[in-house]
Image: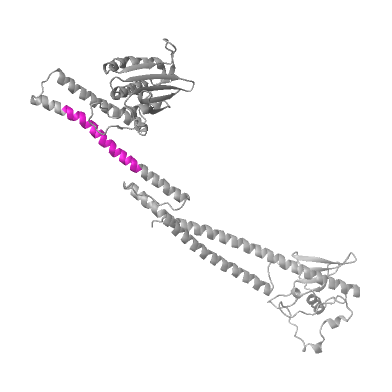
Amino acid sequence: MNIKIWHKLAILLLATTSLTIVIGIGLSQQSFKRGFQDYLQHQEQRRLEVLAQNLISAYEEKGNWNFLRNNNRLWLSFLRSSGEHFSPGRGRRRTRPFSGTLSEPLSEAIPPPHDRDKRRPFRPMGPRSGPPKMSLLDTDKQMIVGIPAITDATYLQPLKNNGRVIAYIAIKKKGRIVDRLDKIFAAQQNQAFIVNTLVSLVVSLIVALLASVYFRKRMSPLTHIAQHLTSGQYEQRVHITHKDELGQLGNNFNILAQTLQKNQQSQQHWIADISHELRTPVAILKGELEALEDGIRPLDKNSIHSLRQETERLNSLINDLYQLSIADMGALKYEKTDFDINKLLQEVYERFKLRFQQQNLTLHYSDAGTGDSVQAIQYHGDRQRLYQLLSILLENSLRYTDTGGEIRIKLTNNERDIRLIVEDSAPGIEEDKQPFIFDRLFRLESSRNRSKGGAGLGLAIAKQIVMAHEGDISAHTSELGGVQISCRLAK
């Protein structure tokens, strides 16, 4: 059987609540028992004090204990006079309390034989209440009257007259509740505890089931969207109605679905763009070869040069794709060393200067030196990759700058970083599109078959190189009317 999470949640809530209730009621019951025992002991002590006062008063009047020795009926009369706790049965009519003096004969404290038929007959303590385990002992702790069952578990209450001990009351300590009404009261309390426990358990079960249903209702949309995501349906969204943890989880699911949908669309566009980029040079090569094969074009130097250009274009596209793929996997290797970055810029400048002149473009280089001197700037990085970075930026300007335009290269140096800036003249790029020129295959023109070419991968590779040097790259509008690309390289 597959136990679902809301079933586990219901069982956990029920078990936790039930355990808490049982422990709480058990502790309450134990506390009640201790409190009730303390109450009974307090009542017994209070009535014992009354008995002691009555006995002391009788002793003061008589001067000794001879009047009470072995007189169990008179002893019971003293017990009744101290209160109903020592009476033969609880809940019956109270007897007349002992006055504390013996102004009348002691024999009158007990009803005479001829009056016994007029009063309720004396009922000795039976097993329902049990006789009190109590005796009166003299100063030598010898029995005067009472029950001669004195053990180590007996409590001795001294009776003092004028600071002198005149006798002891021996009381059998109670280890449990023995009185009938006390037992009934304790049984009623135990029954109430049991009823409360059962009611609490039923309420806990209902609450656990309601909580399980509630959380199941809250979690069902999350389960459904997870199933849709695993099947590739990224357009599904969770309707958020709460701002708690489950609501935040649902919001995260929505973000995940949106991200996956965006990545899916990006992947589809990427495949379509790459297919188009690869198809163009392949189609040209195929057309050129068919023309040569059919004899439409002669196999001369110009035909071979055209085939070579298309081959190089195809090879360059394949290399760019390869570099981007290994950069995404983190496998693009960087061999960082210390070198003069100013000297590197001069090498790139000398390489591209002639090509810019052939396109009727002016290339300026402004180094970080003063006057005609060139200041050496040491930098720790991958010299080959930074050479590739500058080549990409200059190729981009060479391809898109109008004839007669101007391109500037600038290097700035400070304590925290080095900045490489390449800016050109018209045409420019709208400001809202400038952040996207470093995206793969991004192009401003809608046409894919333009003479200025380029697969839109160069600036994406440039961004990877800058990020590998713990820097950033950005595009802005140039003062020359074109685009300014700024690369910050951390030292």
* Residue 344 visible within the image: no
**Who's the residue at 40% across and 47% down the image?**
253
- What number of labels is visible? 0
Q: Is residue 121 left or right of residue 21?
A: right
Q: Is residue 425 above or below residue 63?
A: above
Q: Is residue 181 magenta?
A: no
State the image coordinates of residue 173 (x, y, percent, origin top left).
Answer: 73, 67
Residue at horizontal 74 percent and vertical 78 percent from the top? 88
Does 60 sit above or below residue 463?
below
Q: Residue furthest left?
A: 295
Q: Nearer the viewer, residue 107 or 93?
A: 93
Is residue 337 found left or right of 87 in the rendered image? left
Name the foreground residue: 405 vs 489: 405
* Majority secondary structure of magenta residues: helix
275 with respect to 390 (left or right): left
Magenta extent: 260-285
Membership of 282 in magenta stretch: yes
Residue 379: image x %, image y %?
Answer: 43, 19
Query: Where does the N terminus fall, quadrant-wise?
Result: bottom left
Residue 453: quadrant of the picture: top left
Please tell me whether residue 254 is drawn above or below residue 12 in the rendered image. above
